[in-house]
Image (cartoon, rainbow, N blue to C red):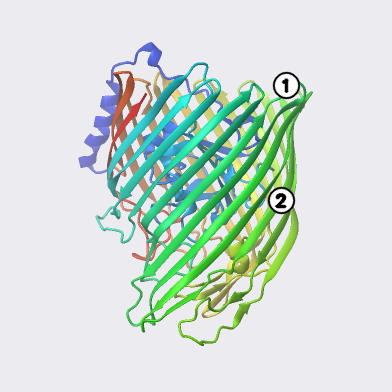
Amino acid sequence: MPKRHLWIVAFVLIVLILAPPAAPAADAPPVALDDIVVSARGVESRISDTPGGIGLVDAEDVHRDQPIGIADALRRIPGVTISPDSPWGAEVNIRGLGRGRVVFLIDGCRVNTATDLNAQFGLIDPAEIERIEVLKGPVSALYGSGAIGGVVNVITRKGRFSDTTEAGGTVTSVYKSNPDGFGTHAGLMLNNPRFWVYGSGNLRDYDSYKDGTGTVIPNSRFKDYGGALKAGFKWNPLNHTQIQYQHHEGAEIGIPGTGEASLPAVADVTYPRTSRKLIDLTHSFTPARGAWEGSVVNLFHQEIDRNVRVDRLPAAGPITSIHPSAHHRTRGFKWFNSIRGGDHRLSIGADIWQWAITSERTRRFANGTVGIDQPVADAKQLSAGLFLEDHWRLGDTLALNAGGRIDLIRAESEAHYVWLQPPQAGAPNPLKRPADEYEDTSWDAHLGLTWRFLPDWSMTFLGASSYRAPDLMERFKYIHLGSYEVYGSPDLDPERSLFFEYGLHYIRPRLVMGLGAFWNRVDDLIVELPVAADRREMANVAEARIYGAEASVQWRFMPLWSAYATAAYTVGRNRTEDRDLADIPPLNGVAGIRRDAAIGLNGHLEMAWASRQSKVGPAEHETPGWQTLNAGLAYRFQWAGTVQELGLAAHNLLDATYREHLSTGRKPALLNAPGRSVLATWRMTF
């Protein structure tokens, strides 16, 4: 570390150490802290009692980090890695699997869209998040197709039923120096014994960022805004209804990376407008007595509009710009029941969802003509399934968890012609692909064991088999953006995963430790297969093996103070071609200390790091190791019936120049991460 930076680190530590002690009432509770999640079983369950890797991020973690996107907020969960094509909407990679192999949910509602380029994880403002629950692998029977890599469930802020009528809210503003810009979010709620109402709005506007050398990364800017309106009503002690509307929209979002799309190396790729709308209705019934603990019925309708502009193409080429657009509509229904009998607790239910795509692609030619075709013909995918899980207490120290589901998958596409509107009248318009449909039945199953072999120690074991049905793009797409053509294949088989995991947990009121190891075999892996110099097709050609280990520790070594560290190691092999698998993160982790007080001075000092990654797939670049330092101070105080917080923080404090291994780039060819960024924040809670 250069000497000129040592004083910054020393200053943060000295200020935190010399901070006056908080009043006893404001003392933060011990970390204790066997966290509780609901995404794994559908009901509340402790992480240490749940076979399989699980991670949790809460609203305070998100506020402290002020991340650009969801992936940045998850970096402290071992085994979860950022995969950015752009700062906005960077993808999440879980234990070497990402994009379409990770199910993304917002309040339990599945987000369906194309994943060739970053988008889905940018469709919500991080300030609207109450918590994020991450399932690392196929640890649950509740989710069906796509969960072979895991599940990311974002749970947003809402109101609550209170004993008396009360009103409250939060207003947050942040300024960042890199990327240069600001963000603001406000949420208001009214709570009552019979009902609650919550409303929020947000706005962010950031320029293109600079890497550690001071070089501006072209076309990495973004602007987004949105809002939500939510309400809950208690009909009687047994019946509760909740309804919500969410809207999030982005404008002029630059994509400097290439993702998995066949993008021209020299062009600019931008989302001029992209949006998400969600209408969600949930009714809960809780019987007063008997074995039936509760039932939840959920209906949702979600629309995602994505518009792309590909311009600044080579001047000598025949096309000046390309404008793909797609409308993704998902409608879903889920019925979940919890039943308890003796030592058994059953989770049983059914779900069905349909994803529909309508799309077009406008090509503007240098001679002034315009042609319109489609990246994928109008298509639909239906998934309907039944699921069952049993959590069985075998005694005071042993518990067995078994579950499974069966799904009907149906996909259909209309006929795909070369043109919707030819560039010249009377131009030939042959059929590119006839109308087609596909139907299959697939299944998931898992068996897990939890053993509390000592009062503070537990072991978990998990074996699972899961699947991922090919999505609409993989079956029916036709992508041609300049480099080569990519064709979907209607007859693709589902990917199949065989998964094993071991976990060791130690939990004390002031110390929590975890260790895990996993092995994942994925058969019939779907990849782009080159069949000619200018053509690729989606095919089941690869058999993959992915395995690794993870560790984490959190220690409350004195009141208000905690230290933490994580590490994750993953290896991937393409067994079909006997070579290293692409998109495998290097050995990486974080280590830090922080001070948490409800009132008074707070702060953190953290190092994030990754080792060199030399085990790479074809056309993948090796990545040097790197370390970055993050630091922050915040002061909370009470004023006029509110809690005010003023904060100052720095990301990449030492201005390191580095590249996330899973980033993709075109301009420059290797997409570097942001350099030093100084953040100033203000939050008011009332």
- Of the 4 image quadrants, the one containing the C terminus is top left
Q: Nearer the viewer, residue 221 or 664?
A: 221
Considering only vertical position in the picture, is 153 above or below 20? below
In the picture as drawn, the residue positioned furthest to the top comes out as: 24
Q: Is residue 296 left or right of residue 279?
A: right
- Of the 4 image quadrants, the one containing the N terminus is top left
Amino acid beneath label 2: Ala
The tally of labels here is 2
Asked which secondary structure carries label 2, the reply is strand
- Residue 653 lies, in percent from the top left, at 28, 42
Tell me where residue 35 sits by quadrant: top right
Residue at point 77% right, 25% down?
291
Contact, mark 1 vs mark 2 (Cβ under 8 Å): no
Asked which secondary structure carries label 1, the reply is loop
Tell me where residue 599 sits by quadrant: top left
* Residue position marked by numbered label 1 in the rendering: 396
* Residue position marked by numbered label 2 in the rendering: 384
Mark 1, other Cα within 10 Å: few <14 / some 14–19 / many ≥20: few
- Residue 277 lies, in percent from the top left, at 50, 48
Residue at point 34% right, 57% down?
220
Q: Nearer the viewer, mark 1 or mark 2?
A: 2
Amino acid beneath label 1: Asp
In the picture as drawn, the residue positioned furthest to the right comes out as: 342
Q: Is residue 391 left or right of residue 8?
A: right
Q: Nearer the viewer, residue 447 or 91?
A: 91
